[in-house]
Image: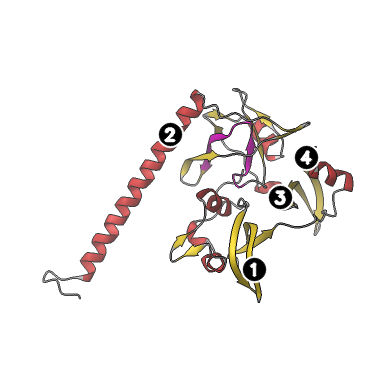
Amino acid sequence: MNTVILNEKDLPMEQLRELGLVKGEEMLMERKDIHALLSGGRTNLIKLHDISRSGIEIKEMEVKLSLVRGVSGKPDLLVHPVYKQSLNPSYITQAEADQLILGEKANILKEVDREGEKKSLLVEYDWDTKEFVVTDMLKVKAPDKVNGMALSPYQKERYSAGRQIELEDGTLIQASSTSAEGIRSNRLALVVSVLMDGGISYLLLTGLKALIGEKGMLAQTNEKNNGYKQAFKEYEKQQLSRLGDMLSDEKLNTNAAHSRGYTRSGMSR
């Protein structure tokens, strides 16, 4: 999965507004899609209506969105439409491309030379957009815990290399840049813990995509075991704490604005 690398204030609001995804100051997107953008991933399919860009009028279309650093260093919005036919990356064979398209493999790891620098790239196929998705493996970070279970250094290494790993309760997980959550699993819901600048952060991931096995998609379960339930309590506790902090900040700002704006007589300064 990808951890959060941007704040909401960094989002290219005007570009999102052009696509009809911002109204006033409100973002008209699912929370998980916003998180996908902030963490450097791709959103789920989003249906756009009555779009006009670069002189082209579009009544309706489905796209995925992602962000890339522009020349100025600020995030630019990338729009990924549904293609009629996929274009194979030059560094995979047709046989490898077919394996991804047919779901015989979840991903293919490739070592490539880019401007004299060796890079490890993870190649996946997005069936939604009929597009090959390439991820620099240095950008993939394993969670510290899943449903309260800590990942060992060996498991983290395998996860960051795009491999499936199995946890002690039978939970299977695998990094995936084609899903908004950045992770596939044999569970429909997970609570993952990631280490960030501010300490441990808990993320609730629901509606997860299935893993790809040798015979196609693996079955998923909605089981919520004791590990999940305990981790969910920690998630709820953190959300309540953040809500309390937000309300406190809002109250302070309101009081400060009131103090600056009016004298005791009620006249504006």
Kindly state the secondary structure of the residue where label 1 is placed. Answer: strand
For the residues labelled 1 and 2, the Cα–Cα distance comes to 45 Å
Q: Is residue 163 above or below residue 39?
A: above
- Magenta stretch bounds: 180-195
- If you read the primary sequence from the N terminus, does the residue marked by circle 4 or circle 3 appear first? 4
Q: Identify the amino acid type marked 1.
A: Ile
Q: Quadrant of residue 98?
A: top right
For the residues labelled 4 and 3, the Cα–Cα distance comes to 21 Å
- If you read the primary sequence from the N terminus, does the residue marked by circle 1 or circle 2 appear first? 1
* Left or right position of 40 against 112: left
* Left or right position of 249 against 150: left
Q: Is residue 187 magenta?
A: yes
Which residue in the rendered view is the most extreme toward the left?
265
Q: How many marks?
A: 4
Per the rendering, the mark at residue 103 is 4
Kindly state the secondary structure of the residue where label 2 is placed. Answer: helix
Callout 4–callout 3 Cβ contact below 8 Å: no
